[in-house]
Amino acid sequence: MRIAIASDHAAVDLKAALREYLIELGHEVADLGPETADRVDYPDYGYKLAAVVADGTAERGVALCGSGIGISIAVNRNPACRCALVSEPLSAALAREHNDANVIAMGARLTGEDMARACLDAFLSTEFGGGRHGPRVDKLSHPPC
């Protein structure tokens, strides 16, 4: 699977660890930065990640910042992205099964590396359930207002 990963400065170490983990699992990974822990703005990286998921360059995305909140908001500004902030594997699996999430966000200050790996495993191994969830997910990209 083609997976894009991006973070802000607070999550650069977790990003590096998860990038290596994804490569070990056999995925093609695009690291969208940053490369150092020098201060950056999470929206810039969230928008960059959203763009490559929206245009199909990446099939899925992993967005990281200190809390995961800010970067998830940035990713979700793109109507083609459904980014779920997760902190444990059940929420990661449900984000896929019920919401067809194509990006997950995690907070490096809140989620340890082992838990982040478990969330990734659940996110990547769970299929969208379809059925009654399909029309609801369609509304996420096509709001009535």
Image: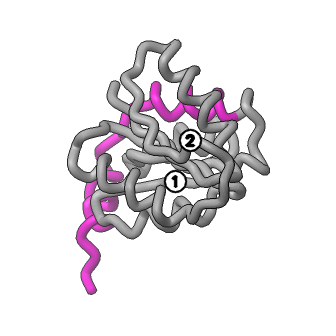
Residue 32, percent from left and from top: 44, 43
User: Measured along the vertical axis of the image, is residue 80 above or below residue 20?
Assistant: below
Task: Please state the extent of the stretch shown in magenta in the rendering.
Answer: 116-145
Q: Distance between the Cα atoms at labels 1 and 2? A: 24 Å
Residue 65, percent from left and from top: 64, 54
Per the picture, the main secondary structure of the magenta-coloured stretch is: helix
Q: Residue at x 31, y 38 (%)?
A: 58
How packed is label 1: few (under 14 Cα within 10 Å), some, or many (20 or more)? many
Instruction: Say whether residue 134 is visible.
Output: yes
In-image side of 42 versus 11 (left or right): left
In-image side of 70 versus 87 (left or right): left
Q: Report the mark closest to the observer, 1 or 2.
A: 2
Q: What's the mark number on residue 35? A: 2
Task: Name the quadrant containing residue 76.
Answer: bottom left
Residue 40, percent from left and from top: 59, 61
Tag 2 or tag 1, which sits nearer the N-term?
A: 2
Instruction: Say whether residue 96 is visible.
Output: no
User: Measured along the vertical axis of the image, is residue 126 above or below residue 9?
Assistant: above
Q: Is residue 41 magenta?
A: no
Q: Residue at x 59, y 66 (%)?
A: 70
Question: What's the residue type where badge 1 is placed?
Answer: Ala
Provide the residue designation for mark 1.
84
